[in-house]
Image (cartoon, grey):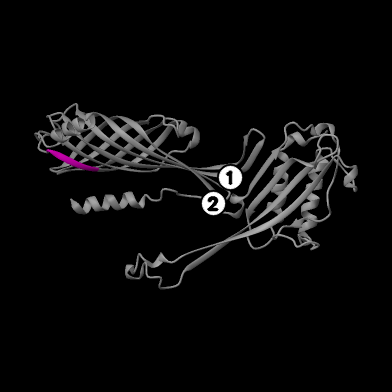
Amino acid sequence: MKKIFFLLIVCSLLISSKTFGQQGSYFSAQYAVSFGSGDLTNYISKTSWRGALIEYRAAVRSNLLVGIDLGWNVFYEKKDFDTYTMDTRSLSGVQYRYQNVVPVLVAFDYLISSTNALKPYVGLGLGTMYSERATDMNLYRLIENTWHFALKGELGMLYQISYNSSVKFAAKYYTGFKTAIMDSQGYFSLSLGMAWDL
Amino acid sequence: MKKKVFVYLGLIIALGACYPGGAEYYSDIDATYTDYDDQFDFASRGTYSIPDSIVKIEGDLEEGEEPEYVKEPYNTQMLSKIRDNMSAYGWTRVDDPAEADLVLFPAAWTNTSVYYWYDYWCWYYPYYCGWGWGYPSVSSYTTGTLVMTLIADGDDYIEPTRVWTGVINGLLSGSYNATRVNKAIDQAFEQSPYLKTN
């Protein structure tokens, strides 16, 4: 029931007034570079250069936008030859580690200034994050996957470059809460892309 | 605008692969596994015996049938490497297994896996898919495994018991690669320092 109530609020916000400057809503696509933290960086310490996200936002007040984020980040690292020991057993070899992270969030952005071409904003997101972790060693692949409850904090800016498009730059931090399968997974992400008014 | 969206969606897809990178060389696949009985006191022993041929396991033997052995010079090369490592850890080789504290049994086998699929042309001509027409695409790989087992009997055990196992496994590259095999045998002993008697 709570879920239905929440969805109704979101839907009503999405179809309500359009007061984001001249634009009621926009679609954005961005490239993202991400840096793991906590358990994620213990598993893969390398920066993720493979990442993208698409976003939709609709203005519900002059300074408030609500929408949806869909992201995809691929973390990868080749671990040099090493020995992994568990009780009396030891296994040596090269490991290839992969982690795919897909956040799907309802997002809220608050525009600090909505009148100039440059529109800085702060944002929050909540939803879910799919994590798939694969470890290749020898000819075997060990896969763990889970869905986390996820939160996102964001600081960014839109810079209008034409009557219906803007450059979007954002710094975000995602946290996927601990599940029975995986510890909490967090990463910091810098994204750059375009936003088009709809 | 739509074109731009498709360009960006294309970019997201092109960013690729959920599993980038991966093994480039045969040696990247090599793995060494060891396990031991932590109740066994290796340091108080000092002699071992080892057969002068490595059994090649190729299936069930009929009664009275002689097993296959690893061909020369590979047999001697591997045995020499094993003996060198045992010697470096302070073990003295004796000819009669009845007089030895431990017996080291080496064995080897290869395993070929064949895989094939029929639907690889679907991207071009979907009409064929699912009808069983066309030729399958076939590929295969062969792995080689060497197992070294240290067996104890006598006062400590009623029946001969495995107190150490070392397994090396890798993808065969078409010809015997002494460097890879020697390195893997060395690694099995390096990650088993509890075998030291000196």
Q: Which one is nearer the viewer's eye here, B69 or A94?
A: B69
Q: Which residues are magenta?
A: A24-28
Q: Is residue A27 magenta?
A: yes
Q: Is residue A57 magenta?
A: no
* Main secondary-structure element of the magenta-colored stretch: strand
Q: Which one is nearer the viewer's eye here, B178 or B98?
A: B98
Q: Quadrant of residue B36?
A: top right
The chain containing the residue under callout 2 comes to B
Q: Which disc number belongs to residue A94?
A: 1
Q: Are marks 2 and 1 in contact (CB under 8 Å)?
A: yes
The chain containing the residue under callout 1 comes to A
* Left or right of residue A139, residue A19 in this image: left
* Left or right of residue B80, residue A144 in this image: left
Q: Residue at x 39, y 67 (%)?
A: B121
Q: Residue at x 63, y 35 (%)?
A: A85
Q: Report whether residue B146 is seen.
A: yes
The residue that label 2 is drawn on is B23
Q: Residues within 10 Å of mark 1 (few under 14, many from 20)?
A: many
Q: Position of residue A47 (x, y in %)?
A: 43, 38
In which quadrant of the rendered image does the N terminus of chain A lie?
top left
State how far apart marks 2 and 1 are (Cα). 9 Å
Q: Residue at x 36, y 67 (%)?
A: B129
Q: Position of residue B111 (x, y in %)?
A: 63, 58
Q: Disc 1 residue type?
A: Val
